[in-house]
Image: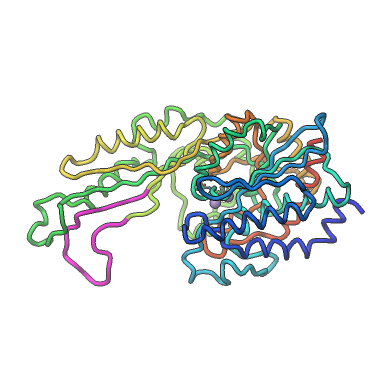
Amino acid sequence: MSVIDYIAENETRFLEELKDYLRIPSISTDKEHAGEVARCANWLVDHLKGIGVEHVELHETGGHPIVYAEFMEAGPDKPTYLIYGHYDVQPPDPLELWTSPPFEPEVRDGKIFARGATDDKGQLFAHLKAVEAHLKINGTLPVNVKMLIEGEEEVGSVHLDPWVEANREKLACDAVVISDSSMYAKGIPSIMYSLRGLSYFEIEVTGPSHDLHSGLYGGAVPNPINELGRIIASFHDPDGRIQIDGFYDDVRDLEADERQAFADLPFDVEAFKAEAGVNDVQGEAGFTTLERKWARPTLDFNGIIGGFTGEGAKTVLPSLAKAKFSCRLVPDQQPHVIEELVEAHIRKVASPNVKVELHFHHGGKPVITERDNPAVQAAMRALKKSWDTDPVFIRGGGSIPVVATFAEVLESPTVLLGLGLNDDRLHSPDEKFDLENFYQGIRTAAYLWDELA
Ligand code: BES
Ligand code: MN
Ligand code: MN
């Protein structure tokens, strides 16, 4: 039997196993779920051993455990690749918006619905099944494979970076392979060669020392919500350009062939609007929608709170207003530089009559992989073999911070072999993973090892 036949023959079992994996609520942000996160790591350890990967390690960190495995039987004359993925998931809230419960996976219309279905359990699982198929049919793999599966991606990979640094020899590889992103569209296999970075902020504006009656004090004292509103409004000009001094200094311009390649992709703006549920697209003047979401930096507010938000009306001047906001960064912007620029901007525009505190959350650096990298080219061939159509190059708007660490510490390029779709609702209710993508992903990963060898 061939590896590809083995995959076809075992599709149903693979799906049942994926369901077991998805049933574990490995929510990394929630301390109450730490036991479930650990249970998920152990499930992976057992599963890896079960598919024939004998060398599996579980590493405790200051946070959630890291699962590490390796299969080095291909021998020292063969190249070595590192598969990275994450077994932690985002919280499922708001629960009432799920059609079926987030941790009771359900297949509807050729898609599996569950938290983590696409981000990243389903995508990572495709690689495990490809490894299984090779080991079951050939007793070995054509290349050496290492696996690094973490439980803290959704909380900023805080313990992973130092672990990678401390284990740089152990993790040494010719390239990293990650399936934790998306394809361009259904039926259009793609390689993502760039990811945006991230700087995340929290701002707290304090006015009066306590809430005040707005009739007795209104108009005569600073209001922190009004002041926060002025700060928010100061970030963009009417053309959607960010007004922070120096913000664009390190932005690498799109190359002419990239702009052309983006323009050549089939893009249906009406479908994009429908998918996002908006009347019209909006963004930085002078750029197309794909350029805006893949290759331009942003500043967006993620949450805001302050004053009276209960039912009815309450005439109050609040003491406090708070907001969370973040910047998506593009090559070659650096999170620590952006933090300084944002802070300087806020100091410049904020009224001296309120107290403004700025707090930095985790960030991540943007990354770009050369499109002519041999591992990238091998992945393009593997995609072509499994999908029987020419794959395309795309960039991605999301962030996977450890990719920059792999480039810096291991000096290894990363191949982003996204198997998800843009409408998979990752981080949202009704997250799903298309089963055709799951099975094609297994085949692609299986072909990939041959192509890389
Ligand atoms: N898998 C996503 C990132 C992603 C999704 C990249 C789709 C490209 C296409 C990852 O799990 C994620 O959610 N990353 C976070 C950053 C992290 C620091 C919390 C993000 O992009 O917001
Ligand atoms: Mn992910
Ligand atoms: Mn995610």
Magenta-colored stretch includes residue 321: yes
In the image, is residue 91 above or below residue 359? below
In the image, is residue 74 above or below residue 9? above
Say how many tags the image has: 0
Query: For this view, does 135 lie left or right of residue 162?
Result: right
Q: Quadrant of residue 106?
A: bottom right
The magenta span reads: 305-324
Identified at 47% across, 64% down, the residue is 93
Residue 205's x, y, as percent? 24, 48
Residues 45 and 152: in front is 45
Residue 255's x, y, as percent? 57, 29
Q: Considering the image in quadrants, where does the N terminus appear?
A: bottom right
Q: Residue furthest left?
A: 216
Q: Quadrant of residue 118?
A: bottom right
Residue 412's x, y, as percent? 65, 31
Residues 452 and 165: in front is 165
Q: Residue furthest right?
A: 1
Identified at 44% across, 42% down, the residue is 362
Query: For this view, does 232 lie left or right of residue 451?
Result: left
Residue 357's x, y, as percent? 27, 43
In the image, is residue 162 above or below residue 443? above
Query: For this view, does 324 lie left or right of residue 216?
Result: right
Q: Considering the image in quadrants, where does the C terminus appear?
A: top right
Query: For this view, does 59 lie left or right of residue 73?
Result: left
Residue 266 visible in the snapshot:
no
Residue 267 visible in the snapshot:
yes
Identified at 37% across, 54% down, the residue is 303
Magenta-colored stretch includes residue 257: no
Residues 36 and 178: in front is 36
